[in-house]
Amino acid sequence: MTDLTLDGITLEVAGRRVVGPVSLAVPAGRVVTVMGPSGCGKSSLLAFVSGALDPAFRARGRVALNGRDLDGLPPERRRVGILFQDDLLFPHLSVGENLAFGLPASVKGREARRAAVERALGECGLAGFADRDPATLSGGQRARVALMRTLLSGPEALLLDEPFGKLDMDLRAQMRAFTFGHARQAGLPTLLVTHDAADAEAAGGPVLRLDGAAV
C-alpha cells in the first residue's frame, strides 16, 4: 500500500506565485480533490507531481510516493498515472493495441500480453472489443479504455485532471463510480482536479481549495 505526500509545494511563473504552499497526504485507496477558480494552478500542480511541469515554472517543495522522493525523476520513472479530460487514445491503434501500449515491458510474450488486455476489457465491460477501432466507441467506452490503459501500466498513484468534464450527466456518474472504484480496489492514492462539486462529493475524501480555503 502506498501514499502520496506533497510537502510545501509552491509554483511560481514570471516571479509570481500561482500555487502554494501546498502540503497534503493522500493515503492509499483514498481520493483528495483539488478545487479552485480557472487559472489558479490546479492542473499545474498535477503536472508538477507527474514530472511534466512546464519549465517556465519555478517549483519548490517535495513530492514523495510511499516515501520515495520523486524530485528530479522523469515522468516514466515516477509510477504516477494521469487521466485528462480528453481520453488521448491513439487513433491508429485498435482498442486492444491501445491497452497493450500501457503494459510494462515486464509482461512478456504475445500470449501473456493478449491475456492481460482481454482481462482488462472484461473488467471494464468491453469483452470482445480488442479489434475495434477507437473511433467506433462511445464517449463512456473510450473513457473506460483510457482508464484501463493507465491502470495496466502499474501506477502507484493516480492523478485525475477533470477526466469527467466532457461526459453527459448520466455517463459522468457512471465514470465517477467506475474510476473511484478501481482506484480504491487497486489501493491507489488519487488526486482529483475538478470544477464540479458533485465530483468532489462522489470522491468522498477531503477537498483542498487553492484559493486558500480547506473544507
Image (tube, helix red, strand yellow):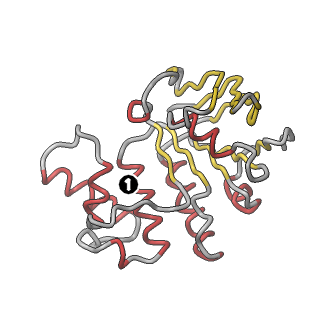
Please rate how many residues cluster around mark 1, counting C-alpha atoms within 10 Å: few if below 14, some from 14 to 19, many from 20: many
Locate the C terminus by quadrant. Answer: top right
Residue for point 12% across, 47% down: 109
Residue that carries the numbered disc 1 in the rendered image: 149
Q: Residue furthest right?
A: 213
Q: Position of residue 100 (x, y in %)?
A: 26, 54
Q: Find numbered disc 1 in the image and state the secondary structure of the residue it sits on.
A: helix
Mark 1: which amino acid? Arg
Vertical relation: 8 (above or below) 13: above
Residue for point 76% across, 28% down: 21
Q: Position of residue 26 (x, y in %)?
A: 64, 35
> Image quadrant of residue 96?
bottom left
Query: What count of labels does the image hold?
Result: 1
Left or right, 208 with reference to 80: right
Residue for point 39% across, 76% down: 137
Is 119 or 175 nearer to us in this picture? 175
> Image quadrant of residue 212?
top right
Left or right, 44 with reference to 51: right
Q: Position of residue 122 (x, y in %)?
A: 34, 66
Q: Position of residue 211 (x, y in %)?
A: 83, 42
Left or right, 65 with reference to 116: right
Vertical relation: 124 (above or below) 73: below
